[in-house]
Image (cartoon, coloured by chain):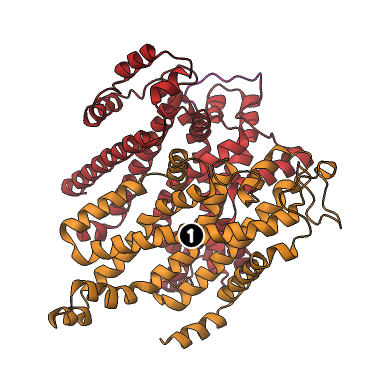
Chain colours: A red, B orange
Amino acid sequence: MPLGYLSRRLFHLALILFGVSVLVFLMLRMIPGDPAQLLMGEYATPEELARLRAQLGLDQSYPAQFWIYLKNILQGDFGKSLRTGAPIVDEIGVRLLATLELTLAAMLIATFFGVAAGVVSSVKQYSVFDYGAMFFALIGVSMPIFWLGLMLIYFFAVKFPVLPMMGRISMGLEVPSVTGLVVIDALLAGEFGGFGNALTHLILPSFTLATIPMAIIARITRSSMLEVLNKDYVRTARAKGMHEAVVILRHALRNAFLPVVTVIGLNLGLLLGGAVLTETIFSWPGLGRYVVDSLMGRDYAAVQGCILVFAGLMAVINLAVDLIYALLDPRIRVHE
Amino acid sequence: MSRIDAFKDLLRNKSATLGMVIILLIAAVAAVGPGLAPYDPIMPAPLDRLQGPSTSHLFGTDSLGRDIFSRVIYGCRISLMIGLISVSISLVPGTLLGLLAGYFGKWPDSVIMRLMDVLLAFPAILLAIFITAILGPSLTNTMIAVGVVYIPHYARIVRSSVLSLREQLFIQAIGHLGGSHTRILLGHVLPNALPPIIVYATLGMGTAVLQAAALGFLGLGAQPPQPEWGAMLSEGRQYIQIAPHVAAFPGAAILLLVLGFNLFGDGLRDVLDPSLRSR
């Protein structure tokens, strides 16, 4: 991949992240009320408020405040949480791993079932399976996932209690943290009981979160497969007497995969957003739930930190998708 | 294709027809809401709290004893209004920005599109949450938040249409004949860029309803006692173990309305924009 393309994209990424930090800064200044008052409560004396304002740099001009803010976030300092007093960057770190665990599990589910449904639908176009799968895909993209989550909780944790209702692992069970992903850590520690427990906790939230991307991936796989299934090279492969499974998986799916890869990448961003709702429903201790809790507790420094991290992740994911796409399809680089 | 042909095609399209029927049904319910609702949607009836579905309360009652069926009916109006207003808030500035960026190119294009990229860098729901937090939780602010979040999507779509239209001979000819930029943009470029905008706006109504319901679910949207479906779901969450119907029916209503918009949008795309036709 040409260095010019890569450096252009990295510059673009830096520009976007700068824009995001400006926007977040401006938006936080628009929140009504005095942040110092908010931090110290209504019984603070004017002297105490003035001291805190000076400490936070709130008595300075906006450009000076922005400079302090930018310097701090570049050093990874998002300030301290109003509710817990702990450094926000530490709080985000722990929760980010929980969100990543949930997001990755959802992505795996969405990719596996989405691609499988899309392939079968395309091979059996206009069959009952095709109509059924595409109908469910349409329902999937129309469904409020917070509702689906609640209904899954009702059916699988209340009516037929086969899965846990909330959390990452049962109370009392502990797994030594290596990667921060409980399922993997349990496996690494050889604690199969803990692994099974963490896995059962992961099933409902990850299926809930996977629904929309699964539906989108199924639809795009189907239409992309339909396009290549009529190509000459697929006909040639069949004419050579190859097994149908080999034709479908090796010849057709490999060529149909490019748009699917893009959609999978773009859906990672969607999953991060979806995590906000899914984590709230399943009390999953991730970043999404943290941002909602911080917002309810008017902990704006924490909200700001989370939003910057989410936006940064989105920007990096989008860049990675573009780069992978450019690697897979040289025509993109030429057009750029 | 003439407008009549397009309409005939639309009627022949099964997906569009089904979507249209669902939307029209919900719009009809919204229009005659008070006439259909058997109970007052706001007035609590403590003696009837958390009753399951029955002949006297089709969808059961909530924790304050209010009839969920009546509240779902009143909610139709709110959800349709959210869809229409949010989409208008995204559509008008988004289209204008896309037109300017695509038509003038150079620095206006760079400035506008980089700004849009910044907005797109946020997960949509998170940006909506943030905006609502600043403006304060209410139904109006929810619509503004959801509207603002989707401005970049319209700007991008319109810009890409304008980029190809700008090179077309008939647009260039009008320019050479002395047509002003405003006349070219509003009289010739915009009408030709409309099909993808209409398709996206229809699908966008569903997305707006979903996002607004999510904000309502998080307690940031419509405030009690307004019968907004997302807020009703949020209340139902507390009673999911003993009274799942409190959450089930408002959620099903959201699903039905969004499904209607998605079906209609898919059908519209097939008719108006064959290049994007889903196979």
In the displayed structure image, the side of residue B50 where residue B74 appears, left or right = left
At x 55%, y 74%, the residue is B16
Main SS of residues in magenta: loop
Residue A8 in view, yes or no = yes
Magenta-highlighted residues: A172-180
Of residue A324 and residue A254, the one placed in the foreground of this image is A324
Residue B162: which quarter of the image? Answer: bottom left
**What residue is pinned by disc 1?**
B85
Place residue A138 in its image quadrant: bottom right
**Is disc 1 placed on a helix, strand or loop?**
helix
* Residue pictured at 31% horizontal, 63% vertical: B96
Q: Residue furthest front?
A: A46
Magenta span has A174?
yes
Q: Amino acid at mark 1?
A: Ile
Q: Is A70 situated above or below A234?
A: above
Q: Is residue A158 magenta?
A: no
Q: Position of residue A146 (x, y in %)?
A: 60, 45
In this rendering, position of residue A308 left or right of residue B12: left
